[in-house]
Image (cartoon, rainbow, N blue to C red):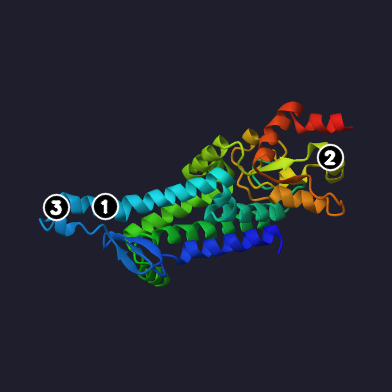
Amino acid sequence: MSLQQWRICAKVAFFLLFLFAPLLNIFRFDLDLGHFIIFGQAWTISIDSILYGGGDSVDAAIKIFTRVLLPGMIFVAIAAWLIWRYGRIYCGWLCPHFSVVEMINHLMLKQLNRVTLWEAASKKTRGVLPKVLVFVSALSMAFIWAVGLLSYLVNPVELLTSIGHLSVGFGSSIFIIAATTVFTCDFIFARHLFCKYGCALGLFQSLIWMANKTAMVVKFDRQRAKLCRDCIHYHKGKPCDQACPMRLPTRNMKRAKFTCTQCAQCISACATVQKDNPQGSLLRWASGNDAVEVDREAAKYKSDTIAIKEVN
């Protein structure tokens, strides 16, 4: 399979895990029981007996460390190492929200001839039906997200049963309505802005990634920049930039791609354009010393436009 096919499989699998993890008791927090459920087992600190005189402070400290702090430290250490080396690869390959971002992108491009409402359309959309399809799709995904998030806090079987019988409780109804409204607005108007500036997890990954000069990054082969001129002229635009879900300048320096999700859409787009070229894509992943050269070359040429002119 191609790189993008592998990525789609990873996204679909993780999105299904996101939806079904509470239902299968893989992971959720039960508000009624007051503790987590992990792989069908109750997960608690188990210090109730100590609080009521059944043990000492040392036993409580050991249980808190082994059941909370140690697992948390191990998880953060592994996640930080992966982010340090590969960047926001979670966003591009697993994140359920980013999966919806890409889905709405493709739908809007097909129905409205533009990826966001803030871009000029390639041609005018006729009729109301395309806009209705985009709105209904965003609303449906927002509802699925709202129910999915709520299922992590209440019994998912009871929640789905009550939805099926249209007998959802007052508190759950308020949560679903509010969350659906917020997510609908997000998916239609601000999904890219949220990923860039509103997602704390995404910003955390970007900051760690930027601190590592040798981390994996998309590199532009500036020695072959002349091919970009021909590509832009033929396609009346930049297919690599147009393919980027985050609307980033894919051929620029690393700091200009602060929110890059390593989705490799730009690499795949360039590879498609250059499919008959024996040398292949002008964009590729680079790491180590090869990644350090990305900013050095960008600083030398200052912009890919200047690079194209100099090669010519």
Provide residue 305's location: percent of width, then percent of height: 79, 32
Percent x, y of residue 127? 70, 54
Query: Mark 1 packing: few (<14 Cα in 10 Å), some, or many (20+)?
Result: some
- Local secondary structure at mark 3: loop
Q: Mark 1 belongs to which amino acid?
A: Ile
Residue 182 appears in the rendering: no
Which residue sits furthest right?
Answer: 312
Q: Is 35 above or below relative to 210? A: below
In three-dimensional space, the C-alpha distance between marks 3 and 2, rounded to whole angstroms, equals 70 Å
Look at mark 3 in the image and give the residue it sits on. 56
Give the residue displayed 65% in from the left and 52% down from the top: 105
Foreground residue, 170 or 283? 283
Q: Quadrant of the C terminus?
A: top right
Of pointers 1 and 2, the one earlier in the residue sequence: 1
What mark, if any, has residue 224 been given in the picture?
2
Could you say which disc has been placed on residue 64 in the image?
1
